[in-house]
Amino acid sequence: MLVRNEALQVLLVEDNASDARLLREMFSKEKHGNFELTHLTRMHDAEIRLSKGGIDVVLLDMGLPDGHGIEILRRARAADPSVVMIVLTGLEDEALAAEAMKEGAQDYLIKGQIENRALPQALRHAMERQRLQAETDLMRENEVQLRDDFLSHVSHELRSPLTSIYSFSSLIADGLAGNTTPQQDDYLQIILRNVDQLRAMIEDLLQVTQARSGKLAVELQSVSVNDAAAYAVDTLRGAAKQKEITLSFLPSVCLPSAFADATRVRQILTILLDNAVKFTPAGGTVTVQAREYEKDGSLVLVEVSDTGSGIKPEDTERIFEHLYQVTDLSRAGRRGLGLGLHIAKDLVTRQGGKIWVTSVSGKGSLFSFTLPIFSLASLICPILAEQKVPGGLIALFVAHIECRDGSVDVPGKALDMTRMVLQQCLRAGTAVLLPKIGPVDEHKIFFVVANTQQRDAEMITERILRQLHSRQEFQSDNFTVSVSHVILPPMSREANDSMATLAERAASEVRDQINATVCLQGAA
Amino acid sequence: MSQKKILVVDDDPDIRLGLRVRLNANHYDVVCAGDGVAGISEALKHMPDLMILDLGLPDGDGFSVLERMKANEKTASIPVIVYSGQDPVANRDRALKAGAKTFLQKPMEHGKLLAVIRFILDAKDHPPASPFSVEADRQE
């Protein structure tokens, strides 16, 4: 039981005068309880009072002149996260009360049914429940922390012996310990394959631990989904060939870049392809496709389909759950830890997408996931948000490559080279490199530097040019490269502008300026 | 051309031997040390072209070795590859900040490991046009 000497601070937020008077009277009649009651009629005033601290319990009417329903609870919680909340509802509002409990209210009192004796008890019980809950939460947190530390420790400890097993079996396989017979070679390949499986499992284990403890970093940038898919297909080609499975991937021509983390997108696709190859019988087909999502133009849709055994309808949700494996193991042979799809779902969600599966049992499965499409605004947004110097400048550099013979396709080597040079010119922390982005022109490469002065921008531009022209690739006559920069004036922020609106405005200004620059260069 | 010398600092003798055989087979001279103190003294004695450093060492972690290597002007220019089984999320940035050339996670496929070693040794022999920064410009 709660033991305390000072008075319990109760805040009553109720706009109905007669309801309020009734409650006040109950408190004044209460002889044993030690309460101090504050009464307010508006949510706005309650928020101010709560944010000052010192209130133990707040009694909230669910219909106030400046707020209604669940929103009131959220505002109270935001003003003071530790306050105990009890809601006051009418008889007809019990459904709302139940919802309020889910939102973190400790109890609800139905107006007109509150008895003198029940009130102080309800308050004390509510406080006690909140205390117990906080204790349980803390215990659970500690447990999770312990388990995560343990898993992280174990996965690191497993790496050393695994490194030695790999190292020596590969030395023997490479003939560095004398000649081997063909049979020994076969057996060594089996060891090495299993080493790789074990390594993948340790990686999965560590990743799940990191995801839970919030240590898993996802860095959003402009990403080519085609490139990521090509990478994943390459990784799985060997395994597919072994099972005589046709692995098909047709890069789509006009696919916009995604706003995602390239490494993570590759990882998601590798998990899905690996699964598909595992569950598809010999002679089957696994197909990867990506396109702009017809149901939502702000998303890219990626699909991995197979001609495997399919998934039962009751399993289509659960296969994304932690450690869940389809029960019929015979079809898949030996399996991993059952973490793959769980990790894929976590990664997709973190990048702002969704993942789901549709399947016809016996005919195959279709795994689909979405990723947000990259836009200039989405990249500028965090830069604007992080700008510590008010009115700081953003400079955007444009490297423009053109073939002299007028052909549309710039060789990949030239793009890679430009990208590398630009990368070298970046300043860590303040600059981000953007690969080819669509809206302006396919063949330009951009990068953004935050908080750069006009003079620095000119210097950087000149240096990029000099560096590019010193490269062998650009000394041949096949193509030309020009570099220019755009300085974005400081954005004035209206009171009710959201960061997204601001970024959208900045992006359109950048686009206008780039178009103007390119036109000028064209004229000259 | 004389062989390049690589110093391997790792407390696991099996990992040291595995690396030694693999590196010897690729025409590198290999010196080994089993802890941080020995690692520093071997570095000063042999002046290797490259150091491969584990993080979990018996006498303090690899970071202190890295810091001491970088603090001593005799050894500061020796490139260091951190090769560790520890969490890259927690350790990669820290290793790079402390002056490591790169962070590789154990076990690393030997083809990749050798490629990284070759790349770092090449870069040391043929430094690229100095990478520039705005700060460097100002000092000109």
Image (spheres, helix red, strand yellow):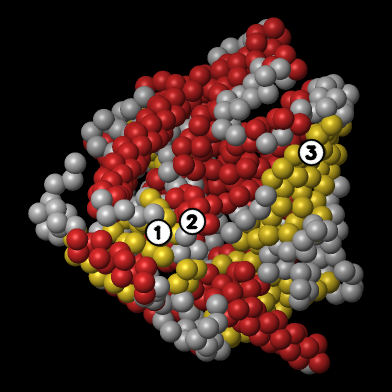
Q: Which residue sits furthest left?
A: A5
Q: Nearer the viewer, mark 1 or mark 3?
A: 1
Disc 1: host chain: A
**Is A264 positioned to the left or the right of B97 in the image?**
right
Asked if both marks, 2 and 1, belong to the same chain, the answer given is yes
Residue B119 in the image: x percent, y percent?
Answer: 55, 47
State if disc 1 and disc 2 touch (CB < 8 Å): yes
> Looking at the image, is mark 2 or mark 3 earlier in the sequence?
2
Residue situated in front as seen by the camera: A231 or A369:
A369
Chain at numbered mark 2: A
The residue at the point 59 percent across, 74 percent down is A500
Answer yes or no: are tags 2 and 3 on the same subunit: yes
Please tell me how many numbered marks the rendered image carries: 3
Residue at which label 1 appears: A112
Please tell me which residue is depicted at 63% across the width and 73% down the height of the picture: A377
Q: Pinpoint the chain carrying mark 3.
A: A
Res. A8 image quadrant: bottom left
Residue A289, percent from left and from top: 82, 47
The residue type indicated by label 3 comes to Thr
Per the image, the residue denoted by label 2 is A91
- Mark 3 lies on residue: A358
Residue A182 versus residue A402 in the image, above or below: above
